[in-house]
Image (cartoon, grey):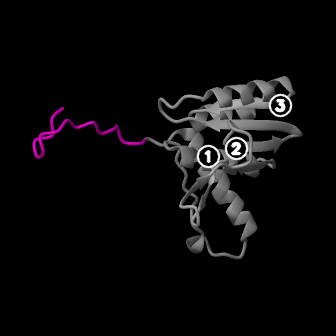
Amino acid sequence: MMNLHNKRPNHSKAPYRKPEAVKELEKLATDDARLKHPTLPEYALIVRKFRDDTANSLTSCIVTYITLKGGFASRINNTGMYRAKLGRYTPGTSCKGLADVMATYRGLSFHIEIKIGKDKQSDHQKQIELQVNNSGGFYYLARNFTDFKAWLDSRN
């Protein structure tokens, strides 16, 4: 479709439609906040909002969900560090290819790699997946929250 104002193709995406699984997460998080702050008036409680259409927002959904279910989850940042004196990034010291989220849930080890759209695993990430699975851990490639939630809930 052509945009008549600037005569460039219009490649806009369809508007985001929040999946039921994300709505359930919002309710869980809001209910948890109510329990933690019972004296706070209802009007003062901020309703928790989530989405799963970007890597950062999907990561937030996953970490929050595991935590609310009684597990431990943490986002892993294994990029290098900017050194102002050197004027460049220096490599990090962690293994290349570590998953974006590492978690423990019901005594099980989970490594969750976040991929949105056409993003694909690197060779390093595929190697980590093999090592995690061979050592008895669970590796999951998360592309949306609905599928991740169903996968984690099936671990019960």
For label 3, the SS is loop
User: Is residue 9 magenta-colored?
Assistant: yes
Residue neighbourhood size for the residue with mark 2, other residues' Cα within 10 Å, grouped as few (<14), some (14–19), many (≥20): many
**Neighbour tally class for label 1: few under 14, some 14-19, many 20 plus, Cα within 10 Å:** many
Q: Are marks 2 and 1 in contact (CB under 8 Å)?
A: yes
| Magenta-drawn stretch, dominant element (helix, strand or loop) | loop
- Label 2 and label 3: CA atoms lie apart by 13 Å
Looking at the rendered structure, the kind of residue marked 2 is Val
Which amino acid type is marked by label 1?
Thr
Residue named by callout 1: 59
Height in image: 108 above or below 79? above
The amino acid pointed to by label 3 is Gly
> Which residues, given as a range, are shown in magenta?
1-16
Label 3 belongs to which residue? 137
Q: Residue at x 74, y 40 (%)?
A: 95
Instruction: Say which label, 1 or 3, has the lower sequence index.
Output: 1
Could you tell me if the residues under marks 1 and 3 are in contact, i.e. CB atoms within 8 Å? no
Do callouts 2 and 3 mark residues in contact (Cβ within 8 Å)? no
Classify 73 as above or below 33: above
